[in-house]
Amino acid sequence: MITIVDYGLGNISAFSTMYKRMGIATRRATQAAELEGATHVILPGVGSFDHAMHLLQASGMREPLDELVRQGEVPVLGICVGMQILADSSDEGRERGLGWVPGRVRHLASQPAAANLPMPHMGWNDVIPQPGAPLFQGLDGDWRFYFLHSYYFEPEDGADAAAAAGYGLDFCCSVQRGKVFGVQCHPEKSHHWGAALLRNFAEL
């Protein structure tokens, strides 16, 4: 069962609706007990890094999610801020992240190539996956997604970068470490590209 973590951030209904159209069942988890039996976990998020970490901790789901990741048997997908909190830390706040994918979240404008560009980075953009990246299969390399963000994930190990996009600079827009995945874009707003990504995740 695909379980969507509802800790107060992210459009849970949008993901449920997309999966319903594919004939794939989902459920919403608002407390630790509802994570039991999950075959896949989606960690959505919008807003700021610290706020997301505070809400996740307050939900009581942080520790069982940590345990799921330690066991390494259940694929987990972080989306937007849900991807950013996979990191160790962020330039946006002071809280420690989940640390599931070692790295730091940086402000796009901190890089000279993007310093004079409008922030946030908003709209459609091409995504270039790494060869064999499992979330990006089936569209012959033609991937476009909707973005709305000012921060990007800088993985400690470049091998954890699963895809890149460009906004002044080429930045990591998807990560993968074991069965932990993250995407900076909004697949729920990205038409058939987003649906393909979510289906690929469900089929892992």
Image (cartoon, grey):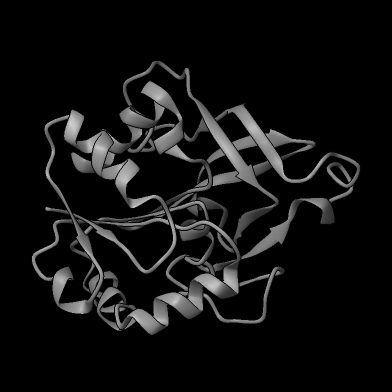
For the image, the number of numbered tags is 0
Is residue 162 found left or right of 6 in the rendered image?
A: right
Answer with the quarter of the image where residue 94 lies.
bottom right
Residue 150 place in picture, x, y as percent = 70, 51
Residue at 14 percent of width and 61 percent of height: 38
Residue 10 place in picture, x, y as percent = 43, 55
Residue at 30 percent of width and 37 percent of height: 198
Residue 4 place in picture, x, y as percent = 27, 57
Relative to 5, is 26 above or below? Answer: above
Residue 195 visible here: yes
Is residue 81 found left or right of 25 in the rendered image?
A: right
Relative to 132, is 98 above or below? Answer: below
Relative to 62, is 157 above or below? Answer: above
- The residue lying toward the viewer, choosing from 115 and 156, is 115
Is residue 172 found left or right of 23 in the rendered image?
A: right
Residue at 59 percent of width and 38 percent of height: 147
Q: Quadrant of the C terminus?
A: top left
Residue 88 visible here: no
Residue 129 place in picture, x, y as percent = 49, 33
Residue at 37 percent of width and 22 percent of height: 192
